[in-house]
Amino acid sequence: MPVLVMKFGGTSVATLDRIKRAAKRVGVEVAKGYDVIVIVSAMAGKTNELVGWVNETSPMFDAREYDAVVSSGENVTAGLMALTLQEMDIPARSWQGWQVPVKTTSSHSAARIEEIPSDNIMGRFAQGMKVAVVAGFQGVSPEGRITTLGRGGSDTTAVAFAAAFNAERCDIYTDVDGVYTTDPRICEKARKLDKIAFEEMLELASLGAKVLQTRSVELAMRYKVRLRVLSSFEEQSDEAGTLVCDEDEIMESNVVAGVAHSRDEAKLTLLSVADRPGIAATIFGALSDAGVNVDMIVQNISEEGRTDMTFSCPTDQVKRAEKALAEAKTGGVLNFSEVVADTDVCKVSVVGIGMRSHTGVAAKMFKVLSQEGINIKVITTSEIKISVLIDRKYMELAVQALHDAFELDKAA
Ligand code: ADP
Ligand code: ASP
Ligand code: MG
């Protein structure tokens, strides 16, 4: 039997009624003759609640216990989904990550999937089971402890299962009906794309479009998984939603494919650090050891052998960063006058593979922002994206103005 992977996100399993609705969708595919692997997220809001409890109990928590707590939301929905399917007379069984097992690295709270042996579940399919319901977002480390894959990680579970089981397709059911030119919740002119190239989706995801977790797109690209994003709230045809595919499957595309935003960014500046070889290695080595995910970096001009170094990281890692830098200072490995943190910034980016061959995108982006009176604090670019750090209060305005200026509401 061909295998299909269907993933249901938090809003799609938020209530017992919604689980029933999702189970009916699964039933439709089972009736077509598929063996189905269903990956479920926790009920909407559950993971946030669990993360909140961990933070309240222990702000500098042990990540192994964080994983023990936050992985539990998915266990509930996996069991409920299996029960709902059984009530519909569809042979179904639930699996937690360790039971499959989903083997991961031991980097707790951000583990990577290393291997998913298929024999266990395939054996059950051979015996007549039609649906394996797997708890997303979780796995087991080589030490035998529960791990999680980072926020949004059920997408990655889904794609990894699709690759491991050679699935015909991996369908990601969510609360929007596909991938849009920008987040439809902040720009009403956002346009749904029928197809998007892996590279563009990868950039959009890593720059904040949370519709797919970045790692899931990476895996789909590497293992050539047919990845589709669609709504769990509407009746679906085989062509519904957005297909994430190779660039050459797309006939026409705009120079800019989409605009992404990341709300919770912070900008930190170290004032007056010595400008000498090894200083960046010391600063960013200390931050990396403390588990801070540094994104943009700018070194300002130096005067009399001293310089200012600016970097950005997620807002919830500012305390960790400040602590690591203060420790490096007291330990005598780093000398600076002070750290200035700006926690009211956000990142807005434009993405498109057309930028490889078209010039002028950066100039146009900066002009649009200046016309709106928005000051740019940091800029970074790559071959197919330009990102700017700006004040958070301008985020929606910037996204909408850029969407208009690059005419993303119109198809190529
Ligand atoms: P799920 O719980 O199903 O995993 P998520 O909340 O993780 O859903 O992702 C879906 C959300 O992603 C949408 O509700 C939407 O607000 C947001 N989003 C951000 N950028 C985009 C985009 N370019 N296209 C579609 N959705 C986007
Ligand atoms: N429940 C997890 C989260 O909210 C994983 C997921 O939904 O993908 O991050
Ligand atoms: Mg998600």
Image: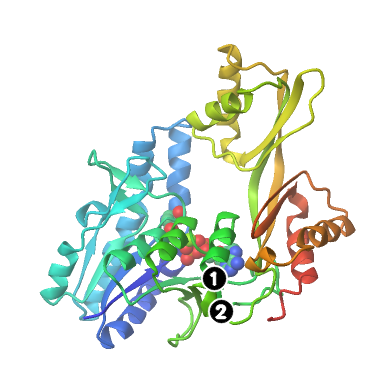
Q: Residues within 10 Å of mark 1 (few under 14, many from 20)?
A: many
Going by the numbered disc 2, the residue's amino acid type is Ile
Q: Is residue 14 above or below residue 35?
A: above
Which of the marked residues, 1 or 2, is nearer the chain's N terminus?
Answer: 1
Q: Position of residue 297 (x, y in %)?
A: 66, 38
Coordinates of residue 343 in the picture (x, y in percent): 69, 39
Image location (x, y in percent) of residue 210 = 54, 60
Q: From the image, which quarter does the C terminus lie in?
A: bottom right
- Picture residue at 33% right of the left edge, 45% below the top: 147
Closer to us: 208 or 46 = 208
Quadrant in which the N terminus appears: bottom left
Q: How many marks?
A: 2
Q: Is residue 233 above or below residue 150?
A: below
What residue is disc 1 on?
197
Q: Amino acid at mark 1?
A: Ala
Q: Which circle marks residue 250 in the picture?
A: 2
* Residue sitting at x 42%, y 32%: 61
Q: Provide the secondary structure element on which disc 1 rests.
A: strand
Q: Furthest-left residue in view?
A: 127
**Residue 172 occupies which quadrant of the picture?**
bottom left
* Mark 2 Cβ inside 8 Å of ligand 1: no
Identity of the residue furthest to the front in this view: 357
Tags 1 and 2 touching, CB below 8 Å? yes
Q: Quadrant of ligand 1?
A: bottom right
185 left or right of 230 in image:
right
* Residue at the image position 77 percent from the left and 32 percent from the top: 300
Along the viewing direction, whichever of 229 and 274 lies nearer the viewer: 274
Bin the neighbour count of mark 2 within 10 Å (Cα to Cα): few under 14, some 14-19, many 20 and up.
few
Q: CA distance from mark 1 to mark 2?
A: 7 Å
